[in-house]
Image (spheres, helix red, strand yellow):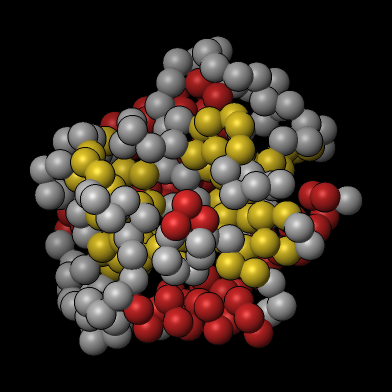
């Protein structure tokens, strides 16, 4: 019953984030994207998961270029060439779902375009690896191996997580690891799998605002799904 409620919430969440992503264009401010997300959340009868959580001031995280996650919306206008990460969570019937995607504003560099593509596909790799009986290390190893094979790096200071009764729960879901290591995944777990991939060095730094950035100033991309592990297989809950 909880997974069914999360699936319903996940569909609502996915539709909202899709609508927000379609509004990404030059001249639109990050604050306007957040206002759109908050309006759609209200109209959908759900609650924003991030606003007020650990003092975050907005419903939507908008992370630009070298910002990995937790970007705070404001007056900054989007411009051609920007790599824009959108991360959104909601609460529906007392349960949380979480999803993210990255949008590039053309014209992009070849590297930025490839970074977004590889990160998107790394999420698919991670979802396929997450199944009952596998370990968190199996999932992380699959993601990092795929990313490294394309010349990029995964961030090691930030990880995915369990999600459901709270926005962040155990187990931690690193995007790196060793096969067979870590916690064993079991039916009934609901997880946020979220590759955070960088074009350069994987080292990141946290600004005073709480925004995480790449230390070398290179671009970052981020994709995320909430999934449920069942005896019948892994189900992606955040699909429109």
In front: 150, or 135?
135
In the image, 14: left or right of 52? Answer: right
In the image, 216: left or right of 60? Answer: left
Residue 36 placement (x, y as % from top left) = 48, 83
Q: Is residue 70 above or below residue 186?
A: below
- Give the residue displayed 37% in from the left and 55% down from the top: 70
- Give the residue displayed 68% in from the left and 79% down from the top: 44
The image quarter containing residue 200 is top left
In front: 8, or 158?
158
Q: Residue furthest right?
A: 1
Q: Residue furthest left?
A: 216
Residue 198 placement (x, y as % from top left) = 25, 44
Residue 234 placement (x, y as % from top left) = 70, 40
Residue 97 placement (x, y as % from top left) = 63, 55
In front: 105, or 203?
203
Q: Is residue 105 above or below residue 43?
A: above
In the image, 143: left or right of 240? Answer: left
Residue 240 can be seen, yes or no: no
- Quadrant occupied by the C terminus: bottom right
Give the number of marks.
0
- Give the residue displayed 35% in from the left and 79% down from the top: 31
Residue 205 can be seen, yes or no: yes
Q: Residue furthest top?
A: 180
- Give the residue displayed 22% in from the left and 49% down from the top: 207
Q: Is residue 163 above or below residue 185?
A: below
The image quarter containing residue 43 is bottom right
């Amino acid at each position: 019953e909880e997974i069914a409620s999360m699936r319903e919430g996940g569909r609502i969440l996915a539709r909202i984030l899709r609508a927000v992503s379609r509004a990404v264009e030059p001249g639109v401010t990050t604050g306007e994207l957040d206002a759109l997300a908050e309006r759609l959340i209200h109209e959908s009868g759900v609650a924003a998961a991030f606003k007020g959580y650990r003092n975050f001031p907005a419903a939507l995280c908008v992370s630009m270029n070298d910002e990995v996650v937790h970007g705070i919306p404001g007056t900054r206008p989007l411009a051609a060439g920007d790599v824009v990460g959108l991360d959104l969570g909601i609460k529906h019937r007392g349960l949380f779902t979480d999803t993210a995607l990255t949008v590039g504003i053309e014209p992009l560099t070849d590297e930025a375009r490839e970074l977004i593509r590889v990160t998107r596909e790394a999420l698919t790799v991670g979802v396929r690896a997450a199944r009952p009986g596998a370990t968190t290390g199996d999932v992380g190893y699959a993601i990092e191996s795929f990313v490294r094979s394309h010349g990029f790096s995964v961030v090691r200071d930030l990880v995915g997580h369990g999600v459901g009764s709270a926005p962040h729960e155990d187990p931690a879901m690193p995007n790196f690891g060793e096969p067979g290591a870590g916690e064993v995944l079991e039916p009934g777990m609901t997880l946020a799998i979220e590759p955070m991939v960088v074009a350069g060095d994987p080292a990141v730094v946290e600004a005073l605002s709480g925004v995480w950035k790449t230390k070398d100033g290179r671009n970052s991309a981020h994709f995320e799904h909430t999934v449920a592990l069942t005896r019948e297989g892994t189900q992606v809950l955040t699909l429109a």
